[in-house]
Amino acid sequence: MLFRNVAELVKLAESRKVKIAEIMIQQEIDFSGLAREQIIEKMDRNLTVMEQAIERGLSGVKSFSGLTGGDAVLLQNYIKRGKTLSGAILLDAVSKAVATNEVNAAMGTICATPTAGSAGVVPGTLFAVKDVLMPSRQEMIEFLFTAAAFGFVVANNASISGAAGGCQAEVGSASGMAAASIVEMAGGTPKQCAEAFAITLKNMLGLVCDPVAGLVEVPCVKRNAMGASNAMTAADMALAGITSRIPCDEVISAMYKIGQSMPSALRETGQGGLAATPTGKALEAKIFGSGLK
Amino acid sequence: MKYRSAFDIIGPIMIGPSSSHTAGAARIGRMARTLFGRQPKKAVISLYGSFAKTFKGHGTDVAIVGGILDFDTFDLRIPNSLQLAKEAGIEVIFQIEDTVTDHPNTVKIRIEDDKKDLEVVGISIGGGTIEIVELNSFKLRLSGSNPAILVVHNDRAGLISAVTNILAQHEINIGHMEVSRKDKGQMALMAIEVDQRVEDIVIEELKALEHVTQIIGMVE
């Protein structure tokens, strides 16, 4: 194991004078015994699936329950009208994150990043900043390895499961991963990547997992929208030179402890939070019929 | 380290909507199928915790049955697996359990045909990564991401070294190994995760050992 936490990951990248993506690729070569080309090709396939999911979502999908679908299209149309408040790039990231999760809700094909419920954040931001940073295919693949490196630390030291740690563990982790990767692609240092991750996750702490009717739709799709915009903002902050007063690994540890103290009603059981609102319950009864679950 | 690969985090490629409740569930079902060694005639699936509460919304039911039908996480047939199982002559029974388990996403799968049966308990720990934690009441830890050999045997002195000797002769390196038994001298299990592909000839040699009652290879 090359690194156990973010501090070690940053130190390693600094001392070897390489990107964080490169450390993750090295780690994967050590772990899997596969050749570098095979590992790159495998990630390339994931990238292709992400791109296809976004395309499908942007062409308009509808879930079986009817609860989600079509919002990515609404956002794209809004952007095209040329007058937005938060800017075209940010909204493009949001719409592409939404697109991915709408496809996921419709039982379409996606790439879990790090989970399916949070699969929109990393690809959404990647395919939005692509238009500004003009990366090569290789750099886009590296974006995913950088995201993997941070997700790897969270998964092993905390959790990426909503059932175990709430939405902060899923969309929170995804958002931090995206922020770190954006910073690296934009030319930021390994340390700035870690700052971006810390700033992002700090703002997701305590986020509960409360899916209406137990479906990965409400509020999951819009949580991905916020995860994407949070990542973009934190990345810009880190690139501006802003640092997190609480170190990245301590934020991850705080997220884990918050998850452990979260009641089970708020950890993917569909029993608390928005799922327990009158409308949430009415939607559940409408979709599954009362008494079915 | 529960997660060891970049592709545990970026991946799997899968049918939505949930990596733990759909992709992970499919992988547990498929592990059960692999351990059983062939298509069963009947499957009794007991769901616990978050799996029990939200299985319909997450497609956990169709995913587990899809796994039992040997479908991968990205197989487009998963949404129709209940119908496909019926057509394949597999009886499927779901049980919703109240018991509190160590992990919120836990499923017990009992599969059988006329000749044998098998019971596994699996947990889905997030992002599609899973562990098999129980096999026929033996505690173990099996991730499914490495080739593995399970040796069911009578608890006798020297048998562990006999098994590892055979692996050593074939230059197969052991990455993780666990032994457990029902009681002293009774039925026991070795769960061995290895780094290399395991050829059939190795399995045959292990089967030929005295006091070995069954070998299950997960060696694809």
Image: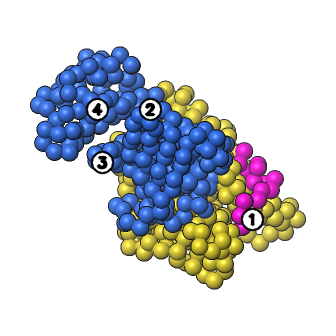
Chain colours: A yellow, B blue
Magenta stretch contains residue A34:
no
Residue A4 x, y percent position in the rendering: 35, 49
Q: Quadrant of residue B4?
A: top left
Q: Residue B37 shows which numbered tag?
A: 2
- Circle 1 crowding by C-alpha within 10 Å: few under 14, some 14–19, many from 20: few
Looking at marks 2 and 4 on the same chain, the residue that comes earlier in the sequence is marked by 2
Disc 1 marks which residue? A66
The lab-note entry on whether marks 3 and 1 share a chain reads no
- Which SS class for mark 4? strand
The lab-note entry on whether marks 2 and 4 share a chain reads yes
Disc 2 and disc 1: Cα gap in Å? Answer: 39 Å
Disc 1 and disc 4: Cα gap in Å? Answer: 49 Å
Question: Which mark's residue is nearer the viewer, 3 or 4?
Answer: 3
Magenta stretch contains residue A61:
yes
* Residue B48 vertical position relative to residue B191 in the rendered view, above or below: below
Depth check, front residue: A43 or B204: B204
Amino acid marked by disc 3: Ser
Q: Quadrant of the N terminus of chain A?
A: top left
Amino acid marked by disc 4: Val
- Which SS class for mark 1? loop
The lab-note entry on whether marks 1 and 4 share a chain reads no
Q: Quadrant of the C terminus of chain A?
A: bottom right
Q: Can residue A84 be seen in the rendering of this structure? A: yes
Residue placed at 44% from the left, 72% from the top? A264
Residue B204 x, y percent position in the rendering: 33, 19
Looking at marks 3 and 4 on the same chain, the residue that comes earlier in the sequence is marked by 3
Disc 3 and disc 4: Cα gap in Å? Answer: 14 Å
- List the single residue furthest toward the bottom: A278
